[in-house]
Image (cartoon, rainbow, N blue to C red):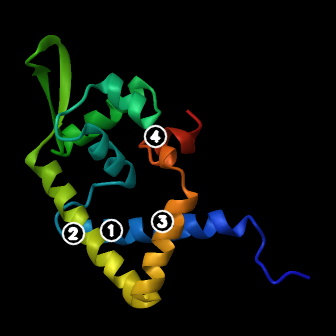
Amino acid sequence: MSSDPPGYELPLRLLFGFRSLIDDLHAELAKQGHPDVRPMHGFVFQAIGPSGTTAVDLGRTLGVTKQAAGKTIDTLERLGYVHRERDPDDGRRVLVRLTDRGLDCLAKSAQIFDRLRAEWSETLGAGRLRALEEDLRKVASPDSARLDLPGWFSGA
């Protein structure tokens, strides 16, 4: 009889680790003035990027419909994280851009992730954490590093 855990446990452990980090991130973001940010919003902020994007392109990047992207933009605009503006190069296009509040949330997220990584390093040991990260780089295809997880999870 093998002492190895069943195969289904690996993706669950990876997911639980992800969930733990994201839950800790959002608890700290709430304390630092961003109580309304949700995990999906992080994907949206990354997809918008420094140059902005359109609702159509945002939906495509996230793997969701234009309508779903539009609803998310509406929510984030109401919360003050994004704003819409006419594309200066093409007046027919409306760009979505991060506001100072959105940029602040991204900057705080980066700092919090660094602190959370340091906590994992303390718990696991720096060498083991670096080895884990390197091993994950070996088995996780660079093609899997996309922002379409929201659509992928929902089956859109």
**Disc 2 crowd, CA 10 A, few/some/many (<14, 14-19, 20+):** few
Mark number displayed over residue 111: 2
Which residue is nearer to you in this view: 129 or 109? 129
Is the residue 110 above or below the residue 5 in the image?
above
Q: Nearer the viewer, mark 1 or mark 3?
A: 3
Among numbered discs 2 and 1, the one appearing first in the sequence: 1
Q: Residue at x 39, y 33 (%)?
A: 61
Does dot 2 land on a helix, a strand or a loop?
A: helix
Residues packed near mark 3 inside 10 Å, few (<14), some (14 to 19) or many (20 plus): few
Numbered mark located on residue 25 in the image: 1
Percent of width and height locating residue 43:
36, 47
Q: CA distance from mark 2 to mark 4?
A: 24 Å
Q: Position of residue 112 (x, y in %)?
A: 26, 71
On residue 18, which mark appears?
3
Q: Is residue 134 above or below residue 90?
A: below
Name the front one of labels 2 and 1: 2
Q: Would you say 90 lies left or right of 119 here? A: left
Q: Amino acid at mark 3?
A: Phe
Residue type at mark 1: give it.
Answer: Leu
Residue 23 percent location from the top left of the image: 40, 68
Q: In the image, is 89 to the left or to the right of 118?
A: left
Q: Secondary structure at mark 3?
A: helix
Q: CA distance from mark 1 to mark 3?
A: 11 Å
Q: Residue at x 66, y 68 (%)?
A: 10
Identified by mark 4, the residue type is Asp
In terms of sequence position, does the residue under pointer 3 or pointer 4 come before the other? 3
Q: Nearer the viewer, mark 4 or mark 1?
A: 4
Contact, mark 3 vs mark 4 (Cβ under 8 Å): no
Q: Which mark is residue 148?
A: 4
2 or 4: tag closer to the N-terminus:
2
